Amino acid sequence: METGQGSTSVIALEDGKGAKAFRTIGEVSKALDVRPHVLRYWEEQFPMLQPVKRAGGRRLYRPEDIELVATIDRLVHREGYTLRGARQFLESKGGKAEETIVLTVTEPAPPAPPPQVVEVEVVQVVEAYDKAAVLQQLYAVKAKLNSALAI
């Protein structure tokens, strides 16, 4: 099975870390949409995938590890390679990832402004009410609410 040229993938990591920062298995899992147990299994199946392991076995993925995981994911899930075939393909490329991952670090969204208080007249409904007047008041209230939501 032939594969095309490497591709550029953009992964938005909303963790506030720099592009060269190490990332945990949970962060990589979320960014690439690959479950953590799959990442751990791939470490066994692909000897070139070796994230740094801290005391206690905590995995930290470097940017090049993330690129390799993205390449494995593409080969296996989009191009139909078996794990063995993907491993052989990567070994033929010197264990290098084909993907070029651009890590985009996005700042958290600013907090929403506090809600604005909108004064609305309360319409009292009595037994003998004028439907047209009530309807007109309801349209006025709707217009005020729409303008408040547009702020």
Image (cartoon, helix red, strand yellow):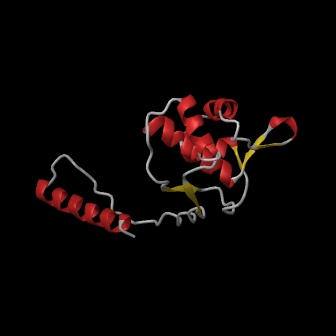
Camera-side residue: 15 or 90? 90
Camera-side residue: 148 or 47? 47
Q: Residue 23: image x %, image y %? A: 70, 50
Q: Is residue 77 above or below residue 52?
A: above
Tell me what residue is drawn at x 35 percent, y 67 percent.
Answer: 150
Camera-side residue: 89 or 140? 89
86 relative position to 116: left or right: right
Q: Quadrant of residue 51?
A: top right
Q: Is residue 24 above or below residue 86?
A: below
Q: Is residue 39 above or below residue 28?
A: above
130 relative position to 122: left or right: left
Quadrant holding the N terminus: top left
Q: Residue 130: image x %, image y %? A: 13, 55
Q: Residue 109: image x %, image y %? A: 56, 63
Camera-side residue: 89 or 37? 89
Q: Quadrant of residue 132?
A: bottom left
Q: Residue 128: image x %, image y %? A: 15, 49
Quadrant holding the C terminus: bottom left
